Amino acid sequence: SEGRKEGRGGAGVMDSPAPPEKVVVLLKATGDAPILKQSKFKVLKTERFLFVSSFLQKNLKLDNVFLYLNSSFSPSLNEYIGSLHEAYNVDGKLIVNYSTTPAWG
């Protein structure tokens, strides 16, 4: 294997960028919203909250979806998932309630 050289003790591994950090997002249906088959996902910290909204609209085939954190408020779609997770996680998960009509706030 001529083209493959491995350094001592895996030294080359240290040069690779760290894998992107992800957080657990738990999606919970509220009211008459359809329930997802899978409700727990790992999402990159660098994604914006808009990613969750778009994901739900696409997978549930809805034009509008209302999102809430901890059953109380709706964050800006420009907020980063990592920041929201840091501030509002419950037992290490970011709990996002979703609804087809306004529910809280």
Image (cartoon, rainbow, N blue to C red):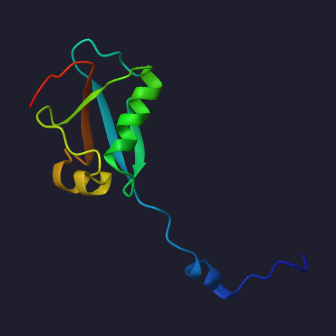
Q: Image point 38% across, 58% down: which residue? A: 46
In front of the other: 32 or 88: 32
In percent of width and height, residue 7 lies at: 70, 86
Q: For the N terminus, which image quadrant? A: bottom right
In percent of width and height, residue 90 lies at: 19, 44
In percent of width and height, residue 99 lies at: 25, 22
In front of the other: 2 or 54: 54
Q: Quadrant of residue 53?
A: top left
Question: Is residue 40 among what the camera can see?
Answer: yes
Q: For the C terminus, which image quadrant? A: top left
Q: Is residue 99 left or right of residue 22?
A: left
In percent of width and height, residue 20 lies at: 46, 62
In front of the other: 28 or 10: 28
Q: Is residue 48 above or below residue 25?
A: below
Question: Is residue 37 among what the camera can see?
Answer: no
Outermost residue, front side = 63
Q: Image point 35% across, 45% down: which residue? A: 24
Q: In this view, does 99 lie above or below 73?
A: above
Q: Quadrant of residue 94?
A: top left
Q: Is residue 71 left or right of residue 34?
A: left
Q: Image point 53% across, 73% down: which residue? A: 17
Outermost residue, right side = 2
Q: Image point 17% across, 48% down: which residue? A: 88
Q: Is residue 60 above or below residue 7?
A: above
